[in-house]
Image (spheres, rainbow, N blue to C red):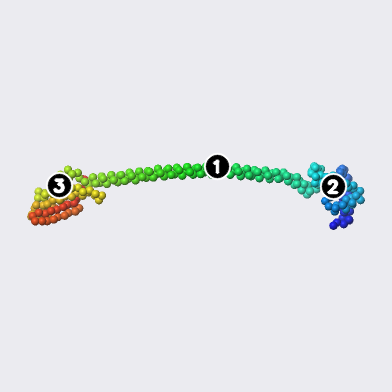
Amino acid sequence: MRGADDYIRIAAYITSLLDRYADAGRQRGCLLVERRTDESQPLIDALTVRGIPVTEPVLPATQLFEGLRLKRADIDGVSRLHYLFQQALPWMAVGMVALCLSSAFGALYWRHEAGALEAELYQAQTQSVGSTITEMGSALRSADELVLSQRERADFVRLAERVRQTPDPASLIRHLREAVPASIELVEAGIVSDDTGVLIIVAGRSASVAAPFAAEEQFVMALKRLGYEVVRREITSGLGNSLFRLALTWSAP
């Protein structure tokens, strides 16, 4: 609690301020004392003793200051900044609301843009995957065609090789007639063809009792000169004759 002397000193200080304003040629209007509690009553009494009239306020001090212009208000530096800050608070609130709204609208806009960009990216990826699948299908078809063509080519090569290893029947008969000696009688001649190759089978018997093997050897040598090779040879000797069977291969000269 303040003592009576404190309020007297405050009243004296206020009186000196009023006198200073009067000496400076300023018009003294009024002195505002905001009465919040009964604690201000001793100050009012001290001011009355000093000859400063004190009346009841018609408005609260806050409403009165709000109605005054800042440049005409008697406010010191710190209070001035505080008052300016209070005056700027509504505008700051409006600015914050505007900033929040702009942020919200910006977020909605960029969310829409992100969705559109994601849709475009998905469409581009889908088209890329589709084109890749199409290209892979074309590549697989080309590979199948290439494999088929290579297979056909291999079949053709094998067929050509088989044709090269197989004499025509007329040529085979002519060659056998040219090569066979008079002492040998041919009883079989044919062409056997499978996956392993082509074999020419020739069977006959030799009527030469003195030298049957010599006649067969003469026949084999004559066939070799015509392009034939013996891959298997079977000979069976009997009374008065000799049976033989030859497996031959042939290649076109």
Give residue 194's position: percent from left, percent from top.
Answer: 24, 49
Q: Quadrant of residue 91?
A: top right
Give residue 28's position: percent from left, percent from top.
Answer: 87, 44
Q: Which of the two discs, 3 and 2, sits closer to the camera? A: 2
Give residue 83's position: percent from left, percent from top.
Answer: 77, 46
Q: Which mark is residue 32?
A: 2
Q: Tell me the SS state at disc 3.
A: helix
Identity of the residue drawn at 11% across and 52% down: 206
Q: Which residue is mark 3?
A: 176
Q: CA distance from mark 3 to mark 2?
A: 150 Å
Q: Which residue is mark 1?
A: 116
> Which badge, 1 or 3, comes first in the chain's sequence?
1
| Viewport quadrant of the C terminus | top left
Identity of the residue drawn at 82% across and 46% down: 60
In the image, 108: left or right of 134?
A: right
Q: Nearer the viewer, residue 170 or 222?
A: 170
